[in-house]
Amino acid sequence: MKTYYERRATEYDDWWLGTGLHAGRHRPGWHESVAELTQTLTALEPARTLDVACGTGFLTQHLPGAIVGLDQSESMLALARERVPQATFVQGDALPLPFPGDSFERIFTSFFYGHLEEEDRLDFLSQARHVAGELVVVDSALNEEHEPVEWQERVLKDRSTWQVYKRFFTAAVLAEELGGGETLYESRWFVAVRC
Ligand SMILES: C[S@@+](CC[C@H](N)C(=O)[O-])C[C@H]1O[C@@H](n2cnc3c(N)ncnc32)[C@H](O)[C@@H]1O
């Protein structure tokens, strides 16, 4: 997975923007949903926040408060630093989180939780609770195009192929899995839950 994201970094935002290899996709309401999701994040109370697996900083830029972004990929972080110069970015593995207990008020993570298989998922949740009082998880919504759990074949511009574990959620299922949470946003494409 590390190599996959490192090699995907320069084309990663194509997924968000509907450009590059994602230009031909039929995703009704996608851009509206991205705008609504970012508005939801902007409206959160400002907090000292750790954005776990921040990628290129596409959502990091909308988080209010003092922000630290963590990602394993230097190429992702280079793009995030350019995009969100006011934030601090740290290269490292999220499992385990390289921060002591209560270092942050909020942990935010987007499109990372749903790539974790059970053991890593439980590990991440326990660490997140140790490092911050609040957890906000954004991930992919379950719609008729997907199964709740898939092994997807991903293709990059260099034509390399990668097998990726990926889950899709209703907000209710995600909230229950997080131990009881509040739905901040739910659409055909995205869910955002706070607990
Ligand atoms: C699907 S991208 C999501 C990026 C960003 N959060 C977003 O919403 O656009 C997943 C990110 O997780 C990072 N990642 C995957 N496993 C990781 C780990 N164990 N520790 C830190 N970062 C990780 C990848 O490098 C990649 O940037």
Image (cartoon, rainbow, N blue to C red):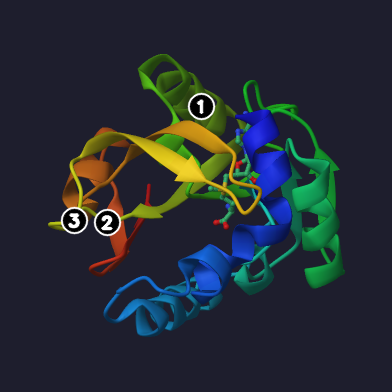
Left or right of 186, for residue 64? right
Task: State which mark lies toward you, 1 or 3.
Answer: 3
Dividing the picture into quadrants, the one containing residue 67 is bottom right
- Judge: label 3 CB < 8 Å from ligand 1: no
Q: Amino acid at mark 3?
A: Glu
Answer yes or no: is residue 10 visible.
yes
- Reading the image, the residue beneath label 3 is 145
Secondary structure under the numbered disc 2 in the rendered image: loop
The residue shown at (69%, 32%) is 3
Determine the quadrant in which ligand 1 lies.
top right
Quarter of the image with the N terminus is top right
Q: CA distance from mark 3 to mark 2?
A: 10 Å
Q: Amino acid at mark 1?
A: Phe
Q: Which residue of the protein is positioned furthest toward the left in this rendering?
A: 144
Mark with earlier residue (2, 1): 1
Q: CA distance from mark 2 to mark 1?
A: 20 Å
Local crowd size for mark 1, using a 10 Å CA cut-off: few (<14), some (14–19), many (≥20): some
Mark with earlier residue (1, 3): 1
Q: Which residue of the protein is positioned furthest toward the top in this rendering?
A: 119
Secondary structure under the numbered disc 1 in the rendered image: helix
- Reading the image, the residue beneath label 1 is 124
- Judge: label 1 CB < 8 Å from ligand 1: no
The residue shown at (36%, 19%) is 118
> Where is 113 relative to 61, above or below?
above
Residue 47 lies, in percent from the top left, at 64, 61
Q: Amino acid at mark 2?
A: Ala
Residue 83 lies, in percent from the top left, at 79, 71
- Reading the image, the residue beneath label 2 is 141
